Image: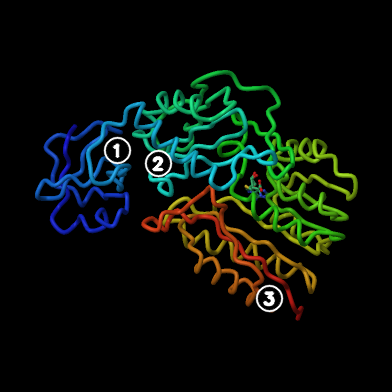
């Protein structure tokens, strides 16, 4: 295995188990490794610090997935690491009779930078964010079939996550079931892993959807940026009188109607509205008691952070101007580069601009199957607040 040396004084973050090495920290390379090559990382004195994937031409040159030794990641290696992650999900009670969709690997949080792996009942979806991880997809697929009970297919959905490298999505093993549905807290959700967004479903809102059901009995609810209607189903089942789901994607809205029908809520009226949320919020009819505002990531990288903050501020200002006194607002950001404090400050700014006083009731996050390594705080990407609007000017 090729050895790459870190410059003197640049190994501190690796010794603290932070998994990234920037290209500027590497001693000059005479020959450039292959894109995605597995390499041993050493200190300037030659001591092995770990095993990493090398990425050509990106600022993060190395992503370390084993600390302290050089290991060739063969099938046995993947069996151990994926098996360990599955045991950790079982410790959380996942999967169970009510929930069969969960995240098995959450990148750095599971010690495997560049890898997302979601289980949707009988279908696993691999989403690699680095060439290095993508090169192991066949071994991972074979191992998944061995360790996840009832699995019948493994799909590779890395085409959009590989940042420039061109790879095609496709089945690695098995066949995809038609009209595939999964269970989340007893609710049925259609999951189209091929054509749906991300890996097919937003597993990261599971706990926050459950929290919403505590507040929706007898209420009128807006689910803005609804995707397939996750929050809407919980709200209706908990006794909401009316739920409006708004999403700009026709496909998402069609799937939302299928979701609502599949769960067959006996009470409550549901409206699936295909529209831009910013246009929708200009309607005068905004007398909702409970608002869910879950936009897509406004910033994909640090250079877009300022624009993203302005986007969140404007969106939340519109919501706060329209919401009646006493309304509860579940507001979220899934932009990794907008951290918890910055998001909080942005909501404060939106409240000031909207001339409203608000109370903070809950600080929300991602569920336990999306763990965060304390050495990689960037992994804590989903932030939310539940706020109550107190006064109107
Ligand atoms: N709350 C959802 C996930 C939301 S993901 C859930 O629980 O599953 C963000 C969604 O916003 C996507 O479905 C995307 O189609 C939609 N979207 C993006 N921009 C939008 C806009 N300007 N107006 C309305 N919807 C938008």
- 365 sits left or right of 248 in the view: left
Q: In this view, does 44 lie above or below 35?
A: below
Q: Mark 2 points at which residue?
A: 114
Tag 2 secondary structure: loop
Q: In this view, does 264 lie to the left or right of 173?
A: right
Find disc 1 in the rendering and name its residue: 53
- From the viewer's side, name the closer residue of 147 and 287: 147
Whole-angstrom CA distance, mark 1 to mark 2, is: 9 Å
Residue 87 percent across, percent down from the top left: 49, 40
Sequence-wise, the earlier of marks 3 and 1 is: 1
> Which sits earlier in the primary sequence, circle 3 or circle 2?
2
Q: Are marks 3 and 1 in contact (CB under 8 Å)?
A: no
The residue that label 3 is drawn on is 358
- Taking the spot 50% from the left edge, 24% from the top edge, the residue there is 145
Q: Do the residues labelled 1 and 2 touch (CB within 8 Å)?
A: yes
Q: Which of marks 3 and 1 is in front?
A: 1
Residue 191 position in % (x across, y down): 66, 34
């Amino acid at each position: 295995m090729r050895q790459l040396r870190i410059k003197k004084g640049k190994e501190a973050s690796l010794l603290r188990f932070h998994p990234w090495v920037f290209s500027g920290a590497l001693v000059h390379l005479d020959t450039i490794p292959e894109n995605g090559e597995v390499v041993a990382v050493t200190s300037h004195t030659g001591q092995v610090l770990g095993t990493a994937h090398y990425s050509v031409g990106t600022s993060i040159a190395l992503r370390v997935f084993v600390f302290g030794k050089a290991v060739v990641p063969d099938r046995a290696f993947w069996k151990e690491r994926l098996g360990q992650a599955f045991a950790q999900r079982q410790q959380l009670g996942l999967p169970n009779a009510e929930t069969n969709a969960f995240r098995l690997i959450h990148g750095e949080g599971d010690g495997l930078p560049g890898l997302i792996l979601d289980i949707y009942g009988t279908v696993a979806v691999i989403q690699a964010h680095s060439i290095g991880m993508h090169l192991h997809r066949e071994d991972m697929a074979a191992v998944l079939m061995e360790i996840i009970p009832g699995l019948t297919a493994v799909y590779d959905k890395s085409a959009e996550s590989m940042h420039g490298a061109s790879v095609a999505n496709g089945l690695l093993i098995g066949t995809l079931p038609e009209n595939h549905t999964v269970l989340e807290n007893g609710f049925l959700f259609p999951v189209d892993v091929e054509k749906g967004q991300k890996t097919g479903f937003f597993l990261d809102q599971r706990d926050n959807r459950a929290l919403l059901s505590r507040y929706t009995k007898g209420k009128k609810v807006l689910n803005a940026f609804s995707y397939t209607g996750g929050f809407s189903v919980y709200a209706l089942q908990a006794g909401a009188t009316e739920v409006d789901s708004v999403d700009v994607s026709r496909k998402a809205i069609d799937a939302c109607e299928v979701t609502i029908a599949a769960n067959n809520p006996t009470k409550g009226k549901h409206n699936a509205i295909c529209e831009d949320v910013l246009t929708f919020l200009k309607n005068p009819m905004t007398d909702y008691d409970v608002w869910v505002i879950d936009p897509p990531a406004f910033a994909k990288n640090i250079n877009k952070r300022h624009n993203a903050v302005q986007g969140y501020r404007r969106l939340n200002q519109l919501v706060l101007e329209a919401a009646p006194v006493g309304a509860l607002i579940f507001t979220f950001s899934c932009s990794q580069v907008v951290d918890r404090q910055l998001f909080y400050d942005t909501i404060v700014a939106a409240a000031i601009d909207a001339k409203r006083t608000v109370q903070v009731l809950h600080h929300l996050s991602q569920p336990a199957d999306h763990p965060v390594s304390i050495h990689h705080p960037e992994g804590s990407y989903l932030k939310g607040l539940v706020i109550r609007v107190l006064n109107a000017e």
